[in-house]
Image (tube, rainbow, N blue to C red):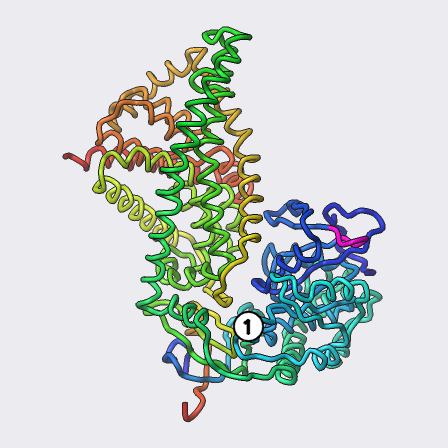
Amino acid sequence: MKLIEAVPGQEFVITDIADDFVRLQAIRFGIAEGARAICQTVLPGGPVVVRKGKQEMALGRNLASRIQVRPVEGK
Amino acid sequence: MAHDCCETVMVNAPPGALKVVLVGNPNVGKSAVFHALTGVYVEVSNYPGTTVDINSGRMGEAVIYDTPGVYGVSAFNEEERVAREMIMQAETVVNVVDAAHLDRDLFLTLQLIDMGFPTVVALNMMDEAAAQGLAVDVDRLSALLGVEVIPTVAVKGQGVGELKAAVLRARRGHRTPAIAPLLPDLSAPADAVLVAEDDEVVCHAHGLALPGTREEIYRLRRERADDTAVKVIKETNRGASFATRLGRWSIQPVTGPAIMLLFLIAMYYIVGVGLAQWLVNITEKTWMDGYYVPFVTGLVARVVSLDGFIGQVLAGEFGLLTMTVSYLIGLLLPLVVGFYLVLAFMEDSGYLPRVAVLVDRLMTKVGLNGRAVIPMILGFGCVTMATMSTRLMGTKRERTIATFLLSLAIPCSAQLAVIAAMLAPLGLLYGLLFTAILLVIYGVAGVAMDKMLPGRSSDLLIDLPPLRWPNPKNILQKSYLKSKMFIMEAGPIFAVGSVLVSVLSAWGILERLQGALAPVTVGWLGLPKEAARAFIMGFVRRDFGAAGLFDLTLTPHQTMVSLMTITLFVPCIASVMIMLKERGKKEGMLMWVADLTLAIFIGGLVNRALFW
């Protein structure tokens, strides 16, 4: 599913980032493909905030719809 | 450090001194480490050709340079380019990392080690990590990296002595083995790494084509960073501190806007009421008008006649020694200082990126993303500085939109002061109406630009640092430096502007221009013909023009029309220069003409639409 469809509290693994520039940035931030993160907040019509460990970051709506994630079972 | 490309100037490098460069991610307490290492004597210089300020200071025989916070050594934006150029000239690197965000920060650490720089890691914010229930095995980390790791709490001075000693013993660490096969055979390891990471400048300097291996290297390094972090971090408890919870509330759908509203109200009372009314009343009315102006006028009168040309230029209505000084020091300085204090607080507390998250939805409507609040908020301080900061935006399209909106619909602090002073007597209704009209213009202009300009704007991707109580010393220092730059920049322009207006007035040109412009001022805008003088002054600075309206006798209706026109009017000369420089002559001029036309057009519409 897409990251934009995640609900707050949901844990997931990032499977694909369809933007070259963002993919590079994401590797440096530590949320590259394969990273496990939690959806912290989704602002209505706005960005998605994700958390990996103690690290929080916000991704614009448009961007979040181009990131594929796989929900972690049982969460 | 041997490297054979990128000839650049290192700011104020004394010969023979060890060049130490501080490198770290944003918001890891790098400037606190810098001040702890160097003490009070800090030099600030603008990195040549950029808007980026570089602090430098001495630590014994060594010179320490601070760099902008970056997530890696590359050239994704202007701050990264500056940081990269400075790092390439380093003899020793002090890498400041946030102990609470070690996994993120280690990417940069490993990149610096891969590049072969003698490195010391300052493992900063150990107290915050402990408060979050994290423990870091420092010896293990040091062994894995191959460099010394010094735990610090820089704001409290903890670990600074050890760090100072370690800087002089800095050594090269263990480079990431997995990337070795991807590196080209170059004498300088830093160059080899940047070539393999597709850095255009370095590849070009060596006459090499981009190898296209950046993403692979980034991935391998990220794997090692994550692996290292897992080995050295122990989580002792999972409780979230109050700051963490407040940070989360500040971006929740309901509590977020509420917290932002509280913040805006607090800001209004501090800057709008406390400074703009109470303090300015003292500085402007009591000090300047009461003591300074009569004193300096008397002084000038002893040498030349006040009615003569020189007397007018020096101490007349627009006098160089009277109006310019009293306006700059009495009116603007307190406001500008107040503004920068608030801004520094927002930056250092980590609240600013959260505001960006909250407004992202609105900003995407005008073709920008949430990060654009930074230039927009800066614009309320000084549009010139804000226009320069648009360089940090992702695409040229966004820079164009933001620059135009700044030049049209964002009044700077100086102008706001005059607007507030003139609107206040008219009552709340006028104030709200004024704000509403300005917001509509901002929105309509932004949406129109977004529709007209080809291409697509970049998306929000922002790191949210933990909320923390900022260090007062850092805030004071930052605001002081920025205010000083403001006075140094605005001062000469003010002086030139006031002389110009004095000269125009003395030669009777002002009178004739007023007559020539009467069809616009009187006919279309419904203002007295003397208002043209204010608009002419407005070409120099909008606030200067607004101040010119101050002396006219206007009805509430005319006040509204004239303030609206002068607010939308062309930005000050300094801003126009920067606009032309940043956006090119053609685009810059087009914006300038659009500002002028829209200001007069909308002013006239307001004149006709408000009929009570």
Dividing the picture into quadrants, the one containing residue B70 is: bottom right
Q: Which quadrant, please, contains the C terminus of chain B?
A: top left
The number of numbered discs placed on residues in the rendered structure image is 1
Please state the horizontal and vertical placement of residue B195, each as a whole percent of the image: 73, 66
Residue B255 vertical placement versus B538 (above, below): below
Query: Residue B126 colored magenta?
Result: no
Question: From where the camera sits, is residue B593 visible?
Answer: no
Residue B10 vertical placement versus B307 (above, below): below
Please state the horizontal and vertical placement of residue B399, each as a whole percent of the image: 48, 51
| Crowding near the residue tagged with mark 1, few <14, some 14–19, many ≥20 C-alpha atoms within 10 Å | some
Q: Which residue occupies 43% across, 63% down?
A: B354
**Furthest residue toward bottom:** A74
- Kind of residue indicated by mark 1: Ala
- Name the subunit of mark 1: A
**Furthest residue toward left:** B612
Q: Which quadrant, please, contains the N terminus of chain B?
A: bottom right
Please state the horizontal and vertical placement of residue B584, each as a whole percent of the image: 54, 42
**B34 left or right of B293 in image:** right
**Residue linked to disc 1:** A26
**B305 left or right of A43 in image:** right
Dividing the picture into quadrants, the one containing residue B126 is: bottom right
Q: Which stretch did the figure color magenta?
A: B58-63
**B579 left or right of B120 in image:** left
Residue B499 vertical placement versus B134 (above, below): above
Please state the horizontal and vertical placement of residue B68, each as a whole percent of the image: 62, 57
Q: Which secondary structure type mostly characterizes the magenta part of the structure?
A: strand
Dividing the picture into quadrants, the one containing residue B559 is: top left
Taking depth in this image into account, of B366 and B151 the one nearest to the observer is B151
Q: Regarding mark 1 in the picture, which secondary structure is present there?
A: helix
